[in-house]
Amino acid sequence: MNEETFNLSIRKFLKMVGVKSQREIEQAVARAIEARKVGATDALPATMRLSIGKLDLDVTFDGEIRLG
């Protein structure tokens, strides 16, 4: 295994996930505020799942996104 290739590949994947996830969250929050489903100061519980089938990896990360 080439450590440099491996690390760069992980970083590229995580960057893509981070950017796309942030965009999706921002759009969903804007829609929810407009529809009055959430308030501008709410805290939103969030869960992220990482799964890699060939590695039998299935990990869940829990957190919170605060709007205000």
Image: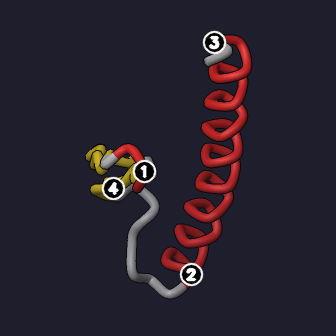
Q: Nearer the viewer, mark 2 or mark 3?
A: 3
Distance between the alpha carbons at the discs numbered 2 and 3:
46 Å
Q: SS for tag 4?
A: strand
Name the residue that disc number 2 marks. 34
Give how far across and how far down residue 28 sits, in percent: 56, 72
Q: Nearer the viewer, mark 3 or mark 4?
A: 3
Q: Quadrant of the N terminus?
A: top right
The image quarter in which residue 38 lies: bottom left
Q: Is residue 36 above or below residue 38?
A: below
Mark with earlier residue (4, 1):
4
Give how far across and how far down residue 13 sits, in percent: 66, 40
- Left or right: where 33 falls relative to 1: left
Q: Residue at x 62, y 48 (%)?
A: 17
- Left or right: where 16 falls relative to 66: right
Q: Residues within 10 Å of mark 4 (few under 14, many from 20)?
A: few
Mark drawn on residue 3: 3
Q: Which one is nearer the viewer's eye here, 5 or 42?
A: 5
Q: Nearer the viewer, mark 4 or mark 2?
A: 4
Which amino acid, mark 3? Glu
Mark drawn on residue 54: 1
Q: SS for tag 1?
A: helix
Mark with earlier residue (3, 4):
3
Which amino acid, mark 2? Glu
Q: Nearer the viewer, mark 4 or mark 1?
A: 1
Q: SS for tag 3?
A: helix
Distance between the alpha carbons at the discs numbered 2 and 1:
41 Å
Residue lying farthest to the front in this orientation: 1
Q: Is residue 26 above or below residue 12?
A: below
Which amino acid, mark 1? Lys
The image quarter in which residue 14 lies: top right
Mark with earlier residue (4, 2):
2
Name the residue that disc number 4 marks. 46
